[in-house]
Image: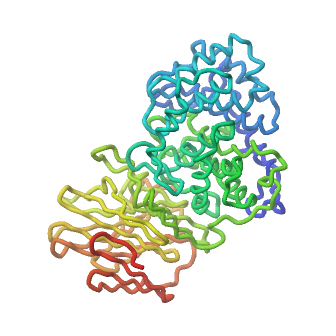
Amino acid sequence: MLTLPDDDRSLSPYTGWTRAHWETAADGLLAAVEPYRSHDRSLVDLPGRASWSHCDGLEGYARTFLLAAFRVAGGGDPALLEPYAEGLAAGPLGTWQPITDRHQPMVEAASIAIGLRLTRAWLWDRLPAAVQERTLAWLGDALIREHVDNNWHLFPVTVAGLFRELGLDDRGATERGLARIEAWYEGDGWYRDGDGRNFDHYNGWAMHLYPALHAYLGGPAEPYASRLRAFLTNYGAAFDANGSPVYQGRSLIYRFAAAAPVWAGELLGVSPYSPGTARRLASGAVAHFLADGRALSREGLLTLGWYGPHEPSLQAYSGSASPYWASKGFLGLLLPADHPAWTSVEEPGPVERADQAIGLPGPGLLIHSTAADGLVRLVNHGSDHQPPGGGPDDPLYQRMGYSTRTGPSSLPDNHVGLVIDGEVTPRGPITPLGAGPGWAASSCRPTPSTLIESISVVHGPHEVRLHHVTAPAGTVVRQTGWAVSASAVGELTSGLVPLHGFTHATELKDPEGTVFGPDATIPALDGVVPETVGIFACLVTLTAAPVAAAPPAFRLDGDRVVLTWADGTVHEIDVAGGLSLAG
């Protein structure tokens, strides 16, 4: 556990964190990895699982170097760079795997290049010419090798920035990489992470972060600064009052890297938030994981999970040093100590100001938060992480809902499907049908001959899920709700109430639970398609606040469904020719 300064509730009434806390946390994380450096300092070999690339020592070097670079460039002790300077003398000679096609060293090359640019006066300019030449020879392969067709295009761009700064040929890598990501921009600040509907935290900590750093270090600011501002306009609403980001998508072991785009907005001067709100969001995210040591091992190392170790949070590429991509969350240390983001009094984040119900048409997502409990839900009608032609459902992408206080279970929670031969069909590829204030809609084909069109409409802590199902008469439709672990019972209330079409309620039990604890309970509803088309609707609730309101009145009026809430609010849903919220 880190030993941090006392909270300063005068400057930071929400988190207690000041710049001193950030500096102490960075120093503590760096000190904890010191015993694991190789004798020549070129590797940081942390204990635990190996990734599929088997270059975990290089990951440890590169990712902690990024943290050290932020710290030194922001006024920290240059002595922090000494082991990294020594490592450069040995790594390119052979302890680092070469950069080859679609291989992990290309990822790590980007962190090394950024670190070298940020600390040039203290490190690069003082290296012997032979070490510089060997380092450039190793990094140079990133400019010409084939990379994975997603955010990896930005790694050669990042390495190319170093080459250009040194007056060297970047082999066209800058233009190629930046041109490729243009095809993935969906508007409102959202990029797809490669072909397919891949929307997750990589939008912030990769697709925006690298162009922002490129701009900060002298590259073109536009269109990247404007897009970053557009993204941040809604992104702040996705942080819980307790500081947590939403648990959704891959690489969740990077945790507080989610704070990186918030700091990037301050670096480029395009943040839509006051400096006090920006720091509140970023400090909340880092403090959530580090203040009580919940994300650290007894040795002070970042663990392979969300809080403690958690195997379902990992991917094949996850290794013992992978969590240190969280170093990106310390980007704000590049801001001088007298910057308003450090000196302003903290102000509340969006979730603390008012309920939020923000529909995002590009990614097909709906950010749904409530001020009464500070909880954030992400309603998913657009992210599926499916390969071309489809594949198995990924529980980190294809659930209908994610939140800051729940995680997916091994059973299909927050799912709608058909029960065929005793098995529930997957959601499969998702086709978004639109999104707007308070709603989002999509369709999927559980089988080639069936269709489920779905819409979510939110109000307060509630969400109505309505499905227009085309399937043979007698087919069972199953809807499940939020998976809540036993440890959260009493803190969270999960409800699933039938409104139309569903006739049978039950509960599913998953002993494995979720990232928040074992023994999860999942509410479920079943209904039967009456002919070849059926309408099914239910009220889904996840809240940490008392719930007294009754479910909305439901009326099916021809091709329109009318929902009348207890407070008099009326929502009308068109159910013919694709679902949408009327008006």
Residue 177 or residue 496, whichever sits in front: 177
Write down the quadrant of residue 383 in the picture.
Answer: bottom left
Residue 164 or residue 522, whichever sits in front: 164
Q: Quadrant of the C terminus?
A: bottom left
Residue 29 or residue 388, whichever sits in front: 388
Write down the quadrant of residue 126 in the picture.
Answer: top right
Residue 8 as seen in the image, left or right of residue 223: right
Q: How many marks?
A: 0
Q: How is the image coloured?
A: rainbow
Residue 161 as seen in the image, left or right of residue 538: right
Q: Position of residue 52 (x, y in %)?
A: 45, 30
Q: Residue at x 67, y 64 (%)?
A: 349
Q: Residue furthest top?
A: 130
Q: Position of residue 478 (x, y in %)?
A: 29, 67
Q: Residue at x 38, y 47 (%)?
A: 196
Q: Residue at x 77, y 58 (%)?
A: 16
Q: Position of residue 508 (x, y in %)?
A: 36, 64
Residue 297 visible in the shown view: no
Residue 142 visible in the shown view: yes
Q: Position of residue 161 (x, y in %)?
A: 62, 30
**Please, is residue 441 above or below residue 56 in the view?**
below
**Please, is residue 44 above or below residue 205 in the view?**
above
Q: Quadrant of the N terminus?
A: top right
